[in-house]
Amino acid sequence: MFMSDAPTEFALPDGVHPFPHRHLTGIAGLQPWEIGFLLDEAEQWIALNRNTSKHDSRLAGLTQINAFFENSTRTLLSFEIAGKRLGADVVNMHAAQSSVKKGETLIDTAVTLNAMRPDVIVIRHDSSGATGLIADKVDCPVLNAGDGRHEHPTQALLDALTIRRRVGRINGTVVVICGDVLHSRVARSNIILLGTLGAEVRVVAPPTLLPSAIERMGAIPYTDFDAALEGAEVVMMLRLQLERMDGAFVPSPREYHHFYGLTRERLGRAAPGALVMHPGPMNRGIEITSDIADDLQRSAITEQVEMGVAVRMACLDVLTRARRGVEGWA
Ligand code: CP
């Protein structure tokens, strides 16, 4: 029952449960086969999502609350679509229209949501660790949809699925992550996931946007983008997160683009056919030029969004199996 049609690069050891976790608050702490299991599970939903009829009923009767304390387009909509395609009753809580605006605390909000007996809660919050805090206070699985600078685990999973499908493997792949690494939960989750699955991860940024202990996470730091691109098979660009910057981290967007913007000329330094990725939303003309972002031969940006729905369906399915009494999961 734990087999999937798609081969994972890291086989499940004998007698080991494929995903023994109640929540998904981060990639940190996951075993390679657990990540591989979620990616394999997501493969089945790609096919369903390409059908005209996209309905599955395994979450029928379950209530999914998406509690978003920060803005989102891709993550919120794909979690909503994922839950609905699996048959769940999906409710969205936007902080701007909630009692958070009247001063209600995060914990009181969590306890209130929990009293409505949801079966799964998806949370985005601007504080690092907020998701873990809520996971300790509620009776159902919690999925982290991005918390501060900490983690964005489903983004890293959808990026890994995109790489695996386009490059054919993750183990041994040279991946360059360029941009605002300091403020990026996407970078953090990707560094952990890609390193766990055996990729070579290089991070590139101006010194002001590189965390000091990045080597301890297994990433190789660069400040010279051209040098980092040598032999790169995947180039993942990050958004300059101006909303998280409380000082002058870059002299100007124009100068940033000169040194760290991905142009066609600069992409020529990477391996032939290197894949271009960006989690979105993009600052066109700053971290990436439009001719690269919109080049469907090289850019996987829209494919990343498509994989996001499949990955979130897999996560919702797997995390609710115990509640649904699926054999081997209770
Ligand atoms: N990649 C990502 O998290 O995008 P949103 O902020 O639109 O959800």
Image: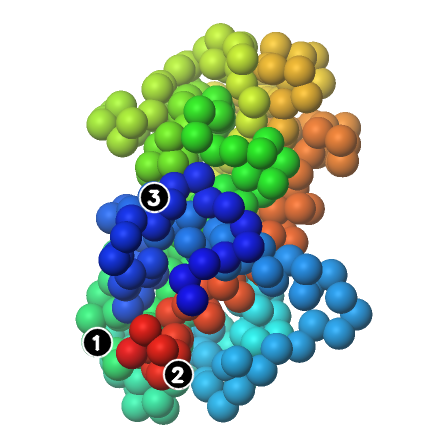
Residue toward you, 228 or 171:
171
Q: Give the CA distance from mark 1 to mark 3.
A: 28 Å
SS class, disc 2: helix
* Residue at the limit of the structure toward the left, as seen here: 136
Vertically, is 146 above or below 234? below
Q: Give the CA distance from mark 2 to mark 1.
A: 21 Å
Residue 117 at x, y percent in the picture: 35, 89
Vertically, is 128 above or below 242? below
Quadrant where the N terminus sits is: bottom left
* Residue contact at pointers 2 and 3, CB within 8 angstroms: no
* Mark earlier in primary sequence (2, 1): 1
Q: Which mark is residue 137?
A: 1
Residue 91 at x, y percent in the picture: 51, 81
* Mark earlier in primary sequence (2, 3): 3
Q: Is residue 149 left or right of residue 89?
A: left
* Residue at 20% in and 71% down: 136
Give the image quarter of residue 146: bottom left
Q: Which residue is mark 3?
A: 32
Please state which of the two labelled residues, at mark 2 or mark 1, is closer to the viewer.
2
* Residue at 49% in and 90% down: 61
Quadrant where the C terminus sits is: bottom left
Residue toward you, 138 or 195:
195
Crowd around label 2: few <14 · some 14–19 · many ≥20 (10 Å):
some
Q: Which residue is mark 2?
A: 324
Residue 53 at x, y percent in the picture: 75, 74
Crowd around label 1: few <14 · some 14–19 · many ≥20 (10 Å):
few
